[in-house]
Amino acid sequence: MLKIWAMSDIQALKTEITDEIEAATDLQKLEDVRVTVLGKKGRITALMKTLGKMDPEERKTKGQALNVLKDEIALLIKTQEAALKKQEMAERLATETMDISLPPREERKGRVHPISQTIEELVTIFASMGFKVAEGPDIEDDWHNFTALNFPPGHPAREMQDTFFLPEDEREEGERAKKLLRTHTSSVQIRHMQENQPPIKTICFGRTYRSDYDMTHTPMFHQMECLYIDKDVTMAHLKGCLTDFVRAFFGLDDLPVRFRPSFFPFVEPGAEVDIGYTKKADGSIKLGKAPEGEEQKWMEILGSGMVHPNVLKNCGIDPEEYQGFAFGTGIERLAMLKYGIPDLRTFFECDVRWLAHYGFDPLDRPNSATGQ
């Protein structure tokens, strides 16, 4: 430590430190210079400590000179630091490559709901047969939902369905004032026959509502109904259409199909349609013809028949000139059979895990030839 020093020593020290600052070629070396000059044990700090032993006049003069030196050195260090940082950045930009892109986020592909998939398959199959899609309202009146379909007031067949009734419409009278949630999509057929003249070849899909809830029933479900009206339509056309439909839908060219007589108020004659299956050892079923020696089992999948003359009359169509067939089924039932879905209620629980398992690739649509 300098005990006695002259003013000329300050100028020499400044020159020496300036040379050291300029010679620092990186930030670490510059930091070392700063510590040796301005640190607690630095050279300028050591000179500052000697001021206390000087007389007041000398302390004042030399103290001012040391403070000026300290500020100048600090400014030189700061300037050199900025220059070194700029130089370092320029070198990095010239030599360093950096991937500033982020990897893409994993996106889950959406899945088509089994109901939507099944409807698409049905539209594809029946479009190839020349049928067109018809639509109608979910809220119906008593006339379109029951009376026009040969359900007269007090008819016992009305008791076959548990209906959600709504307040009557004060603007209308009679049966058209009684409002309800439609119990079947047959009301769409009525509206279409009223608005169009034969030949009529339509298929309709939609939500229907009945007060029931268990493993195979829900208060809201989907139906498909088909209608064909023309001059020479026979039961043979109905059987051929249905046989082709179920075999195309289930993808089995030899699927056994059976027709059993049955009663529906809006058709005469009426028939239940069954498809053949066999039961496996584990209790599951397999659609198709039973192997030789095994029992052929049957499962009902839809109702059908020739349109009742009273229904044609109610829609303004002459039953002496026109006749036709109709059939309908539950869309959920078809989907459950084809895709092995055990519980109807799961269709409406909005569980994405269920949809991920039973849903369909949105880019893999039904084939126009087979519906698959």
Image: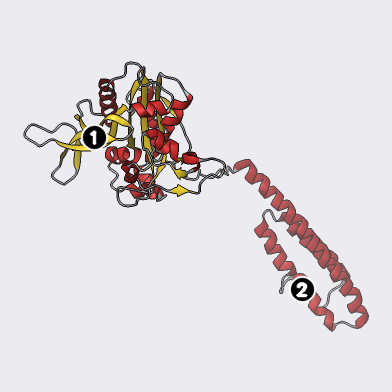
Query: Within the image, what quadrant is residue 4 found in?
Result: bottom right
Instruction: Please state which amino acid type lies under the numbered disc 1.
Output: Ser
Q: In the rendering, at what x and y percent does residue 221 appear?
A: 38, 43
Q: Under tag 1, what secondary structure?
A: strand
| Residue 217, x across and y down, in percent | 32, 48
Q: Nearer the viewer, residue 85 or 142?
A: 142
Taking the image as drawn, is residue 230 in sight? Answer: yes
The local crowd at label 1, few if under 14, some if 14 to 19, many if 20 or more residues have their Cα within 10 Å, is: some
Q: Is residue 136 left or right of residue 119?
A: right
- Residue at 76% in and 60% down: 77
Q: Is 291 left or right of 187, judged from the image as shown?
A: left
* In this picture, residue 28 sits left or right of residue 291: right
**Residue 241, position in %: x, y?**
29, 23
Label 2: how many residues lie within 10 Å, few (<14), some (14-19) or many (20+)? some
Which label sits on residue 262?
1
Q: Is residue 249 above or below residue 335?
A: above
Residue ID for mark 2: 45
Given residues 113 and 226, the one toward you in this image is 226
Residue 124 visible, this angle: no
Total labels drawn: 2
At x 65%, y 45%, the residue is 91
